[in-house]
Amino acid sequence: MTAACAALLTAASAHAQSARQWDLCSSELGTPDVRIANCTTLIQSSGESPANRAVAYNNRGGAYLGKGDLDRAIADFNQAIQLDPKYAHAYNNRGVAYFDKEDLDRAIADFNQAIQLDPKYAAAYNNRGYAYTAKGDLDRAIADYNQAIQLNPKYAVAYNNRGLAYRGKGDLDRAIADYNQAIQLDPKYAYAYNNRGGAYLGKGDLDRAIADYNQAIQLDPKFAAAYVNRGRANLYAGSLPEALADLNQASELAPKDAYAALWLDIVSKRSNLPSRLGDAIQQLDMTKWPSPIIRLYLGQLTLEAVLTAADDPDPKTKKSQICDANVYIGELALQRGDKQQATGLFQFAAANCPKDSLEFSAAQAELKALGVTP
């Protein structure tokens, strides 16, 4: 999550011999396994107070969170809270774990509790804002980011996240202003460059978008999403060889990313190269969206079946998936030379897709290439 897990904390140990273990349990510089081992020793020690053991559980939970072992992380945060019911950091961290499990309501409940215990806890406001962003409640998200920034004016992550919320509302100028501030505060913030590139892409400013993606990739050469985004920007700029190189790199870095595979297929076909989508599916989860679109591209599903699969009881998910279906079916229509069908599909997407989605900017770019005003 683009949020903030609380920093690992150091407890006051009653035993000098455990000082080194506390250092290793509390330091984010070591590996998660080293932190887990030393925190476990402290948890099992009869010489540590309940408050100290709560800190050790919290820190071990943070290490499990870093490993992606969310259930163990939550179990440790539960223990920390049981030992110290006023432990705001443990509530915040458990909220991050619930967010990563996509249980947004539980995440928000934990962030609420962290804020109630510590009303000046800027990270908890930021994290709650990020959860509200994920729920599509952008006004509440912005209010929380405002509070986080008021409490900590140098909080680059909160500026970046508020920029995401403004972009979701379609307010690209405010989004860019927030990304600018995040970058000024942290010039090595690759995500902020990537996100500002997305805002410039949404404005149709391809040169600035590509410049920002260049910077994001320079700062983080393994940033797969930035390669996908730069690849799409190069595609819209008419630079097919550069687009193909970027999407090849994205697929190598993230072979399980279905969207990277789709865009590589689109650019490969425009470059008159054979599709590699059949090979790519060996590493993709074909039980989840957008697998119906991939099956359509492989000739295994009909358009009607894809649109049926896009339906979902959750309105936000349904909107996103119908958006995807229209854009990627539109790309297939372009491949067949059916510009009329493609135009209609892209117009629908430009009117209905979430404004912060890749597909929204794709629909706008394709309409511009077709000579149609979005």
Image: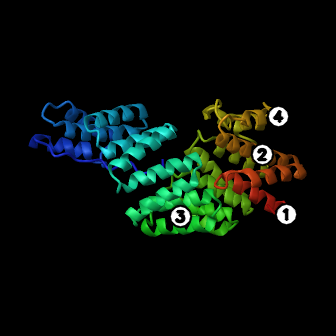
Residue 249 visible: yes
Q: Is residue 275 above or below residue 374?
A: above
Which disc is residue 215 wearing? Answer: 3
Answer with left or right where residue 303 lies relative to residue 92.
Answer: right
Q: Earlier in the sequence, mark 1 or mark 3?
A: 3
Mark 2 packing: few (<14 Cα in 10 Å), some, or many (20+)? many
* Amino acid type assigned to the residue bearing label 3 in the image: Gln
Residue 182: x and y in percent read 47, 65
Query: In this rendering, would 323 be left or right of 134?
Result: right
Residue behind mark 2: 326
Above-or-below relation of 301 to 141: above
Q: Farthest residue in the front direction?
A: 116
Distance between mark 4 and mark 3 Cα atoms: 41 Å
Q: Position of residue 30 (x, y in %)?
A: 30, 45
Q: Disc 2 residue type? A: Asn
Q: Please tell me whether mark 4 sits on a helix, a strand or a loop.
A: helix
Image quadrant for the C terminus? bottom right
Which mark identifies residue 371? 1
- Residue at horizontal 58%, vertical 45%? 252
Label 4 and label 1: CA atoms lie apart by 28 Å
Choose the circle earlier in sequence order: 2 or 4.
4
Check if mark 2's residue and mark 4's residue have beta carbons within 8 Å.
Answer: no
Q: In terms of sequence position, does the residue under pointer 4 or pointer 3 come before the other? A: 3
Residue in the image at 44% along x and 41% along y: 109
Relative depth, front residue between 58 and 135: 135
Frontmost of labels 4 and 3 is 4
* Residue shown at the point (36%, 47%) measured from the top left: 114
Instruction: Tell me the number on the disc at residue 304.
Output: 4
Within 10 Å of disc 3 (Cα), the crowding (few <14, some 14-19, many 20+) is some
The disc, 1 or 2, on the residue closer to the chain's N-terminal end is 2
Task: Give the image quarter of residue 261.
Answer: top right
Spatial CA distance of label 2 from label 3 is 31 Å
